[in-house]
Amino acid sequence: MRKIKSLFPWLISAIVFWSAGFAYNVYFGGLIGWHRKAYNNKVALAGDIKAQRRLILVGGSGVHYTFNAEYMEDELGFPVFNFGLDGQVGLDLILPITLEEIREGDIVLLIPEYLMLLDDVGTGPIAFPFALATNNLDLIEVSQKDFFENTLTLGIPGLNSLVKSGVDLITKGHFDDYYSDPLTPRGEPTRTFLRQSSWWQMTITRTVSDHSIQVIEEFKKDVENKSATLILSLPIIYGDNDEETLANVKETAEKLAKIAPIIYDEKTLNIWTSSDLFADTHYHLKPEGRIIRSDQVIEELKSILNN
């Protein structure tokens, strides 16, 4: 009994430290905390749009950091909202989360990054912590073992994250990270991150996975059950137009076209071979690049909407 009692202080200390780590990761300086805040803000902002028809842009950060929704809205004449989240969440969670916000009359433009399109699993590396932080665990399947391990991990902040948060707090007076910047009324970032390392051209070595095809097919049915419309698009990337990449991207487009109308530049397959307009990743664009990308989608959408 004495040995058990002697463990109580250690047990209490462990619970206190885990709780502090969980609060940091999920609610304050951790990346999942910023994802949770951005997601909640987007849900609230999208709900504020009362129009009978909205264009909802769906995908990962390759949507969040790639468009100018207000510019598109002015050109199209109806509200445009950017519901881009993070590709590391995965299609299996991004699509049902988005579905909850879709209303009758909406046009849903789904633009998954290749990170998601080529994935055989559907849930990305941050799917569980994101689902837990946003109260959406019911939307993904997770074993008891994974539930325990992931929940435990959420209470253990990474050393790099803690150091960065400490530096931010000292130098800026607040925590700072991706998705920590305020959003525009149309769900878009108000800051641009620029790449600090050298560029290299992305290559696409596979075609879209069977799992992704199945998930997108199911999503289309769910969207149409809400009396909304699904349109697909290939993402813009900074990439190499080598034969293998072109063949895989073209085959991906052909497979997706069997599910729903798909828009992309048939000449370039949405592969930009210059990095001049890209910000910090092969998917994220600088503000001037976002206008060019928005113009491209506007023109491609008009041909579909007119029909």
Image (cartoon, grey):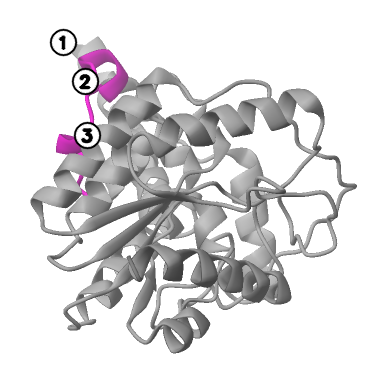
In the image, 29: left or right of 293? left
Q: Earlier in the sequence, mark 1 or mark 3?
A: 1
Residue type indicated by callout 3: Glu
Q: Residues within 10 Å of mark 3 (few under 14, many from 20)?
A: few
Q: CA distance from mark 2 to mark 1?
A: 6 Å
Location of residue 208 with respect to 228 vertically, above or below: above
Location of residue 244 with respect to 112 vertically, above or below: above
Residue bearing mark 2 = 5
Residue type indicated by callout 1: Met
Bounds of the magenta segment:
135-147
In the image, 289: left or right of 9? right
Q: Residues within 10 Å of mark 1 (few under 14, many from 20)?
A: few
Secondary structure type for disc 1: loop
Q: CA distance from mark 2 to mark 3?
A: 54 Å
Please give the name of the residue rendered at 55% of the width and 69% of the height, measured from the top-left corner. 67
Label of residue 1 in the image: 1
Query: Are discs 2 and 1 less than 8 Å apart at CB?
Result: yes
Please give the name of the residue rendered at 81% of the width and 37% of the height, measured from the top-left corner. 240
Secondary structure type for disc 2: helix
Residue 297 magenta-drawn? no
Q: Residues within 10 Å of mark 2 (few under 14, many from 20)?
A: few
Query: Are discs 1 and 3 less than 8 Å apart at CB?
Result: no
